[in-house]
Image (tube, rainbow, N blue to C red):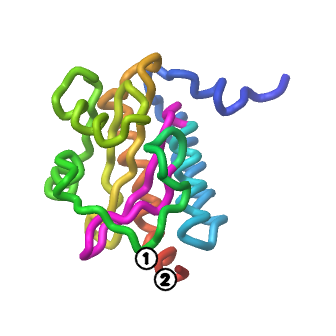
Amino acid sequence: MSPPSRSDQYKYRKSWGPSTRLSATNRIRAIITDSDGLNATSEAVAEEMMALFEAEACSISLLDESGYRDIVNLGRFAPGDKRFPDPDFRYPVRDFPLSTELLLKGTGYISANAQSDLYKEYQGMWPQMPAGSFMGVPIVASGQIGGEVYLARGAKQPPFSSEDLEVARDLATPYGSALPRLLALE
């Protein structure tokens, strides 16, 4: 009997048991170990995060003195967004209240209510964004919040849970640890 495909293995899990968490963490660590550049590593981590959380979109953004810089966008995003955006483009964090809070408090966020004002504000900025739930978790590099992993699900998918948020935060940790090395290779 062949092992289940990744999509079958993770199909709308109801909980993250210890072995599933360990398997997911090991997948992310293997990607980081095998990759040698910022874009390739970010793309592979984002693809894995999308699969693990069955998201319709994933973005990895890094913070610098000028604002947020998208490293990679996968899945459904706004028209004109590119898989690898212009490396010189920055957007002001203050325009995104959840990202601002993430940077100030170091915690992640979940929006599972498509009727909330905040969700409508984000939906207005990105009309192609899946109309379901979304979450963001910090990327911590060298003890500092250095960016964000953002994931979104469509309306027909179950909303993200607090356990999903906790696991996503854990999975962003190895990426954050590798970030200084990856940036040095850029």
Residue 185 in the image: x percent, y percent? 54, 81
Q: Is residue 16 above or below residue 28?
A: above
Residue that appears at 47% across and 62% down: 71
Disc 2 target residue: 184
Please tell me whether residue 136 is drawn above or below residue 127 in the rendered image.
Answer: below
| Dot 2 and dot 1 residues touching (CB under 8 Å) | yes
* Highlighted range, magenta: 52-73
In the image, residue 15 lies in the stretch drawn in magenta: no
Residue type, label 1? Pro
The vertical placement of 172 against 14, above or below, is below
Residue 98, image quadrant? top left
Which residue shows up at 43% across the image and 35% down it?
A: 128
- Rendered location of residue 105, percent (x, y): 15, 53
Q: Residues within 10 Å of mark 2 (few under 14, many from 20)?
A: few
| Amino acid type for the residue under numbered disc 2 | Ala
* Extreme residue toward the right, this view: 1
Quarter of the rendering containing residue 35: bottom right
> Of residues 148 and 126, which is closer to you in this image?
126
* 63 in magenta: yes
Task: State the image coordinates of residue 96 (x, y, percent, origin top left).
Answer: 22, 50
Q: Which mark is residue 180?
A: 1
Main secondary structure along the magenta-highlighted residues: strand
Q: Between residues 183 and 1, which one lies in front from this camera angle? A: 183
